[in-house]
Amino acid sequence: MARAVRSGTRMDTVLLVACCVMALLATVLPLNLREAIAGGLRRTVVAPLVSLQEQAVRGRSAFLSRDATTSRLDSVALRNMQLAKLETENERLRALLGLGRELQWGFVSAEALRIADIGEEHSRTLTVGSRVGVEPKTPVVAPEGLVGMVRTVDPNSSIAILWSHSDFAASAMSADRSAYGIVYPHLSESSRDAEIPPERYLLEMRGVAFRSALKPGTQIVTSGLGGVYPAGIPIGTVLGELRTSEGWARTYLIRPAVRPPDVSNVIVLLPKRIQGQSLDRVWRSTASADSAARRIAAAGDSLARRATADSMRAVEAAAARRAADSVAGQPAQPGGTRPAAADTTRRTQGRADTTRPTVRRPDAPRPGAQQ
Amino acid sequence: MSWTRSARAVLAFSLLVLLHYTIRPFLGWRTPVDFLVIAVLLSAVRVRPGAAALIGFCTGLVADSLTPSAFGAGALAMTAVGAAASWLKAVFFADNVVLHGFFFFVGKWAFDIVYVTAERRMHGVELATQILLWSPLSAAATAVAGVVLLLMLRPVLEPQAA
């Protein structure tokens, strides 16, 4: 018994000494050997523990960064909301640029500022005045159509009434010129027809000949009669007929093309542009205005496009130089023809500007053809 | 030691190792609780000093595999702590919570002293600060956690009635 205890004690001592020696040896091993042993352990026995530790550290990081993440998310959401507003404004400004491009001359663009006074919700202060040629009764338009008319003019500003103003009136016709009438704001807030909902921001087209029946959806534009508004400016679309006591003429309810809350930037048509000029072509279709806006938008992005084209040209020029160098090492071709590689490079350069269509003169030789 | 008691001891040991690699990094304290020291101490009092030294060595080597620059230091410290705890196991037979806590405290502090000495990375004031400030604080946290765990694991480990 005593021998067994002694043997056990000796065994314990041996194990302890062995473990201590191995541990001490481990501390003095070369770094690469230590790394090899530690790496082996990490890849085998300790791998699950390493994975657990990583997840715990990740969990702690997520826990600690929760507030910061929430705050960042909130600010991103806020900026996103502002971004939508900016996008809308950007769209409107681009459309305005497109309209200006279609009009070409005889107009000034202006900001339409809301007048805060009570009762003036149907007027706007424009940031242009007589110094740039604005006169009373000049039309105010937006990419969508007619906005209103300038009423009073100062040197640097003017006041315009919107189509919703009670004093507004415009000579109008259907887009196919089959019906003529006078457009007024629809001042009644109660509906006279069960099918048409009551709404303040609508227009009425009165005095339409009884024989001229307009279908809902028909586009109404200015007729040019009266000399205030040139022909062809969109006013709105027919919603339906209003029942009136007049038996000899029809009155139609019109949904305006321009919504008063959207009026922020406008174009004022100068008097010389109005005289005898039809603007039919400018607003021929909404699609044309949209496409004009898209063209302007594309032109607005020209800086980015030019930078891309420049970088592509630089790369292609380098490739062309390399090709020219390699061709220069070959014997010259008979007849002094240009090496094919150079032509190829030139054709590739032309392809860089994808937004501009390739224009080729009819008498120009086809690329690659012998001259 | 019967098979059942051995299995329970292995289970408790594994649980403490798991806690070391989950709770400890999650808490991320400056004075962390060392669950590995608690595991080695609780195992050491149930085995002979030689086996305790071997358990400490293996546990230390596993811990060292994640810190190759101090490879071997943890193994040496754990070996020493495990063997010493096994030789002093009589203290553990006293069913006194405060005494258990003190033993965890001393075990962790001793581990840290051996570790930082064998590691040979710290010198001067930094070494003194580590040994006299951070190590005792960490040892205190380990002692508290050890006592709590010992009370929780008592049904698993069974009282040392024998």
Image (cartoon, coloured by chain):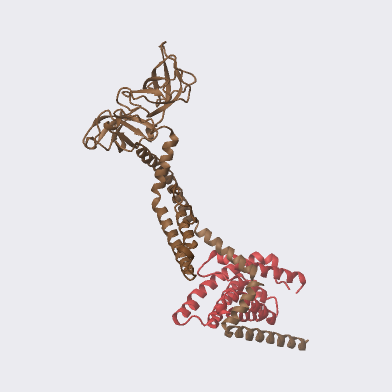
Chain colours: A brown, B red
Visible in this render: residue A143? yes
Query: Residue A128 appears in which quarter of the rendering?
Result: top left
Viewer-nearest residue: A183 or B22: A183
Viewer-nearest residue: A110 or A3: A110
In the figure, is residue A158 to the left or right of A32?
left
A182 vs B85: above or below: above
Q: Residue at left 47%, top 82%? A: B123
Visible in this render: residue B16? no
In the figure, is residue A46 to the left or right of A99?
right
**What is the x, y in percent for residue B81?**
61, 79
Query: Residue A4 appears in which quarter of the rendering?
Result: bottom right
**What is the x, y in percent for residue A11?**
72, 86
In the figure, is residue A358 to the left or right of B24?
left
Viewer-nearest residue: B107 or A205: A205
A209 vs A39: above or below: above
**What is the x, y in percent for residue A62?**
53, 59
- Quadrant, the N terminus of chain A: bottom right
Q: Residue furthest right?
A: A1
**What is the x, y in percent for residue A15?**
68, 84
In the figure, is residue B113 to the left or right of B150?
left
